[in-house]
Amino acid sequence: MKAIVVTDQAAGTAGMKLEERPKPQAAINDVVVQVHASSITGDELSWPSTWIDRSGRDRTPSIPGHELAGVVTALGFGTTGLSVGQRVFGLTDWYRDGALAEYVAVEARNLAPLPGDVDFTVGAALVMPGLTAWQGLFEHGRLRAGQSVLVHGAAGVVGSMAAQLAREAGAYVIGTGRAGSRQTVLDFGAQEFVDLDNDVLEDVGEVDLVFDVLGGDIAKRSAGVIRAGGTLVTITGPIEARPAGGLTIDFVVLPDHAQLNEVVQRVREGRLRTNIGNVTTLDDAVAAFNSANRVRGKTIIRVRR
């Protein structure tokens, strides 16, 4: 099968190559999925799990890209809940080969059914942003209707999803970004916009929750705008700043088929939309990931037409 492989961490996306790789086999509780669409998280090639296994041993050449949508073609021993021919989408294990390939082996519990009226491209674009936003807002941030949330990077792939879900849950949403992203942030559901280049972050007043995707100084300053007992949730790693009487939580997104069901249902009902910036083929994927032109939104690899 054709697949994108990486062997050199220092090379980054420039080290990606399209090669022939053995078709994966389904282990116990696995399924093999014929990939129709997939994607890669921006900093995935910096993660240890891309290069080593859980025992710390080198596992290259590895196939990146852990967000997928496709069709089940084989079941491993003991696999239940899915069937051959079923449309699915979900997140593969970080320490196993990913989905920038024609086929991928995935634990069945990591996948959810993809309804027939949702395109594979949309399904793949929904996985990581949808799970990250859902877990950050509701699982870790415990967001409730009537609360206020500051969403950083609200025009981005994850931030735009968080803004929509928070607004739909009945929260008051303040989105941040650069000046040129104001209208995009508002279109994705924010009721206020903060220009991080020209506005004073602290002028937003107090909020119940900060959803952070930026880290650094912005995340540290954000702790100061959280009211007593509130929460700063980040996906950028540990942050020393703590809100007064509250919590700072950094987390790594986990597969969850129930949460995937929640977000895809909202897409079907028109209450949630993905943020796709570019769709290309597996043959053109290496060039797309190494393009000098910055793409706003998520790049989706359409593996099978």
Image (tube, rainbow, N blue to C red):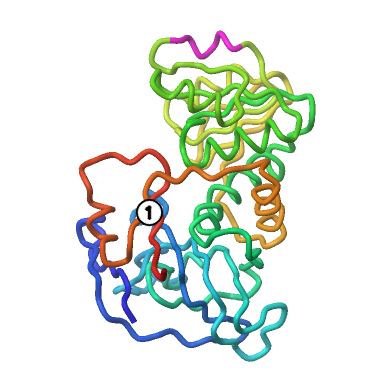
User: In screen coordinates, is 36 left or right of 264?
Assistant: left
Q: How many marks?
A: 1
> Residue 6's quadrant in the figure?
bottom left
**Residue drawn at x 48%, y 77% as measured from the top left:** 34
- Say which element carries label 1: strand
Residue 134 pos. (x, y %): 65, 45
Residue 76 located within the stretch drawn in magenta: no
The quarter of the picture where the C terminus appears is bottom left
**Residue drawn at x 60%, y 25% as measured from the top left:** 190
Q: Is residue 280 above or below residue 22?
A: above
Q: Please name the amino acid that badge 1 sits on.
A: Val
Instruction: Please provide the residue range marked out in magenta.
Output: 199-204
Q: Is residue 36 above or below residue 26?
A: above
User: In screen coordinates, is 305 left or right of 91?
Assistant: left
Q: Nearer the viewer, residue 73 or 58?
A: 73
> Residue 118's quadrant in the figure?
bottom right
Residue 203 located within the stretch drawn in magenta: yes
Give the residue at mark 1.
Answer: 279
Residue 35 pos. (x, y %): 46, 72
User: In screen coordinates, is 237 left or right of 284?
Assistant: right
Residue 247 pos. (x, y %): 66, 32
Most prominent secondary structure in the magenta stretch?
Answer: helix
Residue 143 pos. (x, y %): 73, 34
> Residue 223's quadrant in the figure?
top right
Q: Residues within 10 Å of mark 1 (few under 14, many from 20)?
A: some
Q: Nearer the viewer, residue 18 or 207?
A: 18
**Residue drawn at x 59%, y 17% as measured from the top left:** 192
| Residue found farthest to the bottom | 77
The quarter of the picture where the N terminus appears is bottom left
